[in-house]
Amino acid sequence: MCGIFAYLNYNVNRDRRYIIEVLFNGLRRLEYRGYDSSGISIDSDPNTRFDNYAPIPLVFRKEGNIESLVKSVYQEVATTDLNLEESFSVHAGIAHTRWATHGEPAPRNSHPQSSGPENEFLVVHNGVITNYEVLKETLVRHGFTFQSDTDTEVIPKLAKFVFDQANEEGDQTVNFSQVVFEVMRHLEGAYALIFKSRHYPNELIACKRGSPLLLGVKEHVEDSSFGASYFDVKSLSENPHPKEFFLSSDASAVVEHTKRVLVIEDGEMIHLKDASVSVFKYDGKGKSSRPASVKRALSFLEMEVEQINKGKYEHYMQKEIHEQPESLTTTMRGRLIRGGSCKAKTVLLGGLKDHIKTIKRSRRIVFIGCGTSYNAALATRPILEELTGIPVTMEVASDLLDRQGPIYRQDTAVFVSQSGETADTLLALQYALENGALCVGITNTVGSAIARNTHCGVHINAGCEIGVASTKAYTSQIVVMAMLALAIGDDTISSQARREAIIEGLFDLPNKTREVLKLDQEMKELAKLLIAEQSLLVFGRGYNYSTALEGALKVKEVALMHSEGMLAGEMKHGPLALVDENLPIIVVATHDACFSKQQSVIQQLHARKGRLIVMCSKGDAAFVCPGGSCRVIEVPQVEDCLQPVINIVPLQLLAYHLTVLRGYNVDQPRNLAKSVTTQ
């Protein structure tokens, strides 16, 4: 939700056109996060100073997609004497994609938000300020007027208030970081912020609490190996080399420029001035005059530009569905041990090795997640209970917080999140830590908030996922949690044969996934038959209850068709009333312990003239659909606990083709965001 991006060049000559295009391209890389408006701010003519201050920064804002903003900016520039070829050796620009939370999508509600007509302070913001109404009332009493409906507008106005107060008291030396620190002290909620000010030209300040933010650094040195040796911020600040700095909500907007990054932590403030990077830490306690300076090191970004490009595919979702054989292979690489004639097959999860005994002694394992991540955890609950004998409970993060459900010191709480930044899941993590539970993180993002704040965890290593609707991350999450079950239950002799069969199935899973992807054209044909439908039901049970939920969620998310995943065992307790000859119903009935029960469900639906589409294991078509009375989707058979990985792929393909045929944006569904960083 929302994307923020900034670019500062120091002693690197860049013309205004280049700077604008860097900002635009940064926003394009962040489109997948979800947005409904966007904006940028750049410097105006440096020769037009006002009251001894730097020129008033230019602000461009537009509702709609980024290309609407691009067109609007160039149209506005064409009507002025702004020189796009003018070169800057130092320049600071900021940019933003907004996902509306306070106020409708409109230019006045878009970011950057300003302190007033002269744009003395400008802010781009990702998150929600929960005490903005109190701050707004205070600022109104001091003569400030507000133009937007946003919570963000209080931030630049508060910065101006702090700056003006300091100057009235005769403190002419108040610096940018002191102003922002004072602003941070008054803010409550979750935020990532970037500040730009005409009082502090060519400087930027970034700070965060709860929402993701990172700094990318690109040095221009003749000896590249020399430049690469500066991996601590202090050395970076002391050397005189020309530099370019990139601030972003996400690594995908930085990787094409540099792989040297600093993941900004909660309570930290980054001050970019000249060639220096200053890092300060604010703990939120007391009223000290300034935050403490801290030492931080740069890290190397393990991502390639190719991962954020579509390649030969038309859409990111299509690419990510077809990448699943490779992403599953990467998820399992180095973690499965085939053993030999004398050694058993086993699983090695390095991130859990110091805590595995504690997990085994848990009185309960609690899976906590939202949306697709919750569904992935649900898919692995049965095998975890089977192999460990430990009770497993499921919690939707927001509901756990609303109920303040009991979490005990003897519990192991497993937090599942693709981004590692999901707001509700992060708050649930804080709640579990306060209650003393052992907290395990399962994420796709190294250095994310969940990865940093849990006691231990496993990265799913699915690779960068750009499409809003999660596909390859879902299947990799299932595989990681299946391996978690194997690791916890590895000393149970009675289940050794079962564990080895699952491990062998994991080794073969990428090949089975390639096989099921061959159903692509068949799913496209099915989508053509369903294109005009308004509703879809998906029934599953056992391991595939999660498949029903996730398949329906995918159709709902991207095709904008009402769809519901239902537990087949509950069919007679209400849903059966919906069945008629018009409503399409998908029944997941692959061969497992629930197969005979699903056959019974199919018979009952068929008796009521249900319009059935049955997913079954290869060779089972005659058992589930005698006489060809319904449409059948045959998928490869794997171990029952791994079957959800295979079964979801046809439903992902169906959702994709339905969306494209209906003419909707498959990568950026209406009203949705990839990374849900607000409650």
Image: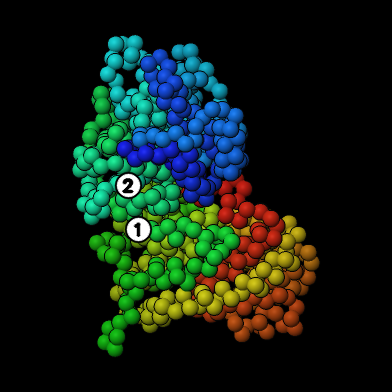
SS state under label 1: loop
Q: Is residue 275 above or below residue 338?
A: above
Whether residue 405 is visible here, answered yes or no, is no
Between residue 338 and residue 538, name the one nearer to us. Answer: 338
Q: Is residue 247 above or below residue 187?
A: below
> At label 2, which amino acid type do we have?
Lys
What x and y, as percent, mark residue 142?
Answer: 45, 13
476 relative position to 588: left or right: left
Residue at the spot x=66%, y=73% of the render?
522
SS state under label 2: strand
Between residue 565 and residue 122, name the one nearer to us. Answer: 122
- Residue count near mark 2 (Cα–Cα under 10 Å), binned few <14, some 14–19, many ≥20: many
- The disc at residue 200 is none
Q: CA distance from mark 1 to mark 2?
A: 16 Å
- The disc at residue 302 is 1
Which coloring applies here?
A: rainbow
What x and y, as percent, mark residue 643?
Answer: 51, 73
What x and y, as percent, mark residue 457?
Answer: 33, 58
Q: Quadrant of residue 53?
A: top left
Residue at the spot x=70%, y=70% of the render?
525
Q: Given this view, does label 1 or label 2 mark the residue nearer the observer? A: 2
Between residue 476 and residue 86, name the one nearer to us. Answer: 86
What x and y, as percent, mark residue 107?
Answer: 58, 31
Residue that mark 2 sits on: 218
Precedes in sequence: disc 1 or disc 2:
2
Q: Quadrant of residue 330?
A: bottom left
Q: Is residue 62 above or below residue 539?
A: above
> At label 1, which amino acid type do we have?
Glu
